[in-house]
Image (tube, helix red, strand yellow):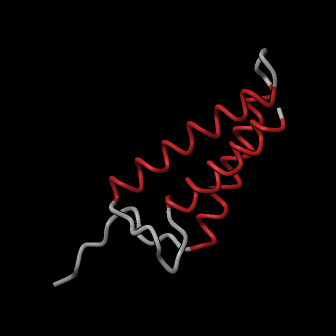
Amino acid sequence: MQQVRPAVSRDPGTRHVLFRTLFRLVLLAAFATLSRPGFGSMFAMFLGLSTIYCAITAMLRREPMLDRSLTHWDEAAVYALLGVVVSKLA
């Protein structure tokens, strides 16, 4: 009897997570350039929203915080750190 594999892998691998993070950063920066209030404030806000999204996704998927591979928790930490840095510079 064959075992059914989920459509979305629970351990996507570090390369996939890095690509997803960089792609999201480029997309957020592109949307922030289109805003009227200013790039820095909007980019910091988008990074904050991405932090919340990644934290909720990690909780729903029950990903461990400290794991050998990168998870949504690591993405949330990156977005939070970048958000603080951008908000201080803006």
Please identify the quadrant where the C terminus is shown: top right
In the rendered view, tell whether residue 69 sits above or below residue 34. Answer: below
- Residue at the top extreme? 36
Viewer-proximal residue among 34 and 56: 56
Please name the residue shown 45% across and 50% down the image: 55
Q: Is residue 81 left or right of residue 33?
A: left
In the rendered view, tell whether residue 35 sits above or below residue 81. Answer: above
- Residue at the front extreme? 88
Please identify the quadrant where the N terminus is shown: bottom left
Give coordinates of residue 40: x percent, y percent.
Answer: 80, 31
Location of residue 44 (image quadrant): top right
Q: Is residue 27 left or right of residue 62?
A: right
In the rendered view, tell whether residue 23 sits above or below residue 7. Answer: above
Location of residue 78 (image quadrant): bottom right
Viewer-proximal residue among 51 and 27: 51
- Residue at the bottom extreme? 1
Q: How many marks?
A: 0
Please name the residue shown 30% across and 72% down the image: 5
Viewer-proximal residue among 5 and 83: 83
Give coordinates of residue 21: x percent, y percent.
Answer: 65, 55
Give coordinates of residue 74: x percent, y percent.
Answer: 56, 62
Please name the residue shown 40% across and 47% down the image: 56
In the rendered view, tell whether residue 2 sits above or below residue 90. Answer: below
Give coordinates of residue 53: x percent, y percent.
Answer: 48, 43
